[in-house]
Image (tube, rainbow, N blue to C red):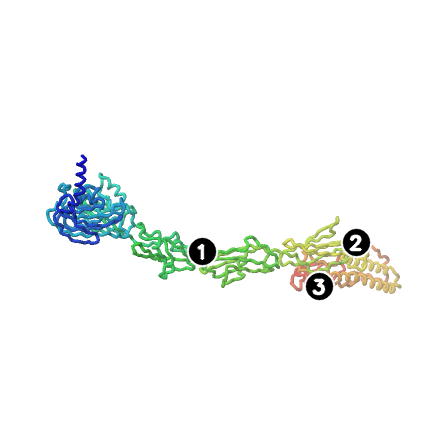
Amino acid sequence: MRWSFLTALALILVAPMASMANPSAKGVISCTNSSLDSLPSNWSIPDQSCIRVDLGELQPEETLFFEVDADQDVDVLLFPASTVSVYQSEQTYRIDSVWQRDSVFESFSGSGEWHWTVPSDREATRWYLVLDNIAHPSDSGQGSQGGQVVEASLDAGIISPQVFTLADSIHRVDAGSYSSAAGPFSVDEGTFLEIYARTMQGSPDIFVMTETAYSLYSPSENWSSSSRIVSADMLLVTNERYLPWEVIGTEGENLYVVVDNRAGPGGGGAGTSHAAVTVTVTLTPVLDPIITSETDLESVDVGTPVFLSALGTPNNSNQIPESGFSWDIDDDGVSDSLGTSVTHSWDSPGNYPVRLSVTSIDSRSASSTREILVVDKSDPVVSMSSSESIVKGFGESLEISGTFSDNWGIERIDWMIDGNVLESNYSVDGDSSSISIEVSNNYSPGTHIVSLIVTDKSGRSTQGDTAVSFVDITPPEILPYNSEMEVTAGDPVIFQISAVDNQSSEISYTWIIGQGTEEEIQFNGPQVLHEFSSEGPQNVYCRVENEAGLSSYAEFLVVVQSDGGGSGLGTLSMVIISIFAAGMLAVGGFVAFNLAVKRRMSDMAKEEEGEEAEEKEEITQTPQSQIGMWENRENSPFQPAYQSEVQNEVEIDISDLIDVTPDLETKMDPLEGELPSEITDTEVEEKVEKTEADSSRSLRKDCSSCSKAFELEMPEGIDTAYTNCPHCGSEELVSL
């Protein structure tokens, strides 16, 4: 056993050396060497010879192309460096662990091309391609057996893949089976899908399917050929075929490219023999820049930031990198921003073109423009300095300010009060304005609305309002009046004052007499009439109050004298009493005169004339003293509702006061003969009462200023006096 093992080992070691010494020996294969760098090359391959091409050390996933031409059958074999020696030592190499089946074509003649991708299951490896014209002991009669010289040519090389190459390799498909050349992959509608098929063996079909259709196709049973996309069919591919297909109607589904070696559909391959086909799938992605925005670009407000997005641009194949998006906002042909989005605002109305340009990773470019209509859709914003009501008094100054802004620009501002323009500004500089208002009598008390109206350049306006209240802060002004007077107890006294207040339409007068005493009384009105019953100084107050509740006070010092109090001012009652006293004295004198002796009539007449003169003087003093009081009375625009009974000047005729002269003369006529036997005091009194009853003391007067008529009752003993017109206050002379 030991010698047998050593003998076998020696044979294995010596066999290669023997083969080199004798090429015709069948134990060791010696091929003519070539390399990838020397291709393309042409060879005449003798019978029982081979060509070994060193492809070099290849990286996983690298793809090579091969183009071969042979006039006779020849085997095309591919080995990694680790197993090529198995082939050359005439061992069994027709197994997948030794050769690379996808790139093996036995008994090949004619022209063919295929692509092969280095497997990814190993590190970088050296590979060899062999053109074999040898009959091997392990062939079992398969493949080319030699027997003739083969004229062959070969070209090969590493493929630099295109950017959008989805698949580029050979597919070996058994009869009745299929292989997925590419997929699933997502593409945009409008993308061109390019399929390039090169058949080395058989006559397969190439289909394009959506993911839904592929799920129905992949089982071996119940497959309906109608689920494929017919417009992308490549049926019965026996050599080179090329199909560019625009992706349409896929509803956004993922796609598959399938190598079909099944029977059907009609016009397709029979699927009864092995198929080997190289399928190259590449994309030409669509470039269609699309500008989108959540804002309505048909009507964009001035100054409003607008977010513009390019994310609506088709990019399922990642054909456009982030840096491949550029924006030209101001239409000057120069990019203003890069990226899939940009935010911009426009400060005035107009039509603004925005251009979006895209550049794909394969250096293609496209652009699109979107017109954006910018209009002023916003009203100005106005803010007043005070949101609460402002209270100001008449005579004070009111200062109000407001701020404003607008998305475009301010055309003018207007300050108004109660809808009336106070001030306008058509040259607005800044974002605020103020106004000063003097609170004068031109305004009525109460609430007023001060408004700031801001109008922008497009005519849109906003109004800001502030409520202000104008109030009366000053009491009524009492006009000058006589604050001291002397009166007689029991005589009616007229108190009258006048006040003005420009902020009040009504003024109330309250008179207080005897304030703080049990006899305190109050009267209302600008003019009152009162009789004092007790002597001494009296204080009379008048409170003048306006509509705002503010008051002014007038104070009178009244000195009340007794009835016999001398030289003070008389009243109407005193005048009447004096008149009656004088009348009675006159009648008594006349009666005494009639009872005297006729012979003494002349003396009595003289004495009577003296008495009458004294009485006349006494009587005339009393009305004249009244004149002083009435002349000091102030005229007032406020007139009492009753007729005035006060006169400022009195002219008295004694004959008017005592109208008894005619009767006296009548009685004296008989005296020329003889006196009556008897005249009683009762008859005289009845005669006087009859005379007083016959006289009328009322009169009617037309005012010389306002022409309005008024009536008054003249006191006894006063026939002529001055009084005020109750309608306009004019001083008028009245006389019976």
Residue displayed at 73% across by 51% down: 515
| Contact? badges 1 and 2 (CB < 8 Å) | no
Nearer the camera: disc 3 or disc 1:
1
Q: Earlier in the sequence, mark 1 or mark 2?
A: 1
Task: Choose mark 3 or mark 2, whichever is in front.
Answer: 2
Q: Residue at image x 84%, y 64%? A: 609
Label 2: few (<14), some (14–19) or many (≥20) C-alpha neighbours in 10 Å: some
Question: What residue does disc 1 label?
Answer: 378
Image quadrant for the C terminus? bottom right
Task: State the residue in front, 181 or 155.
Answer: 155
Label 1 SS = loop
Decide: is 651 above or below 298: below
| 350 to the left or right of 591 | left
Q: Decide: few, some or many residues near mark 3? Use Cα within 10 Å; few <14, some 14-19, many ≥20.
A: some
Disc 3 marks which residue? Answer: 733
Disc marking residue 535: 2
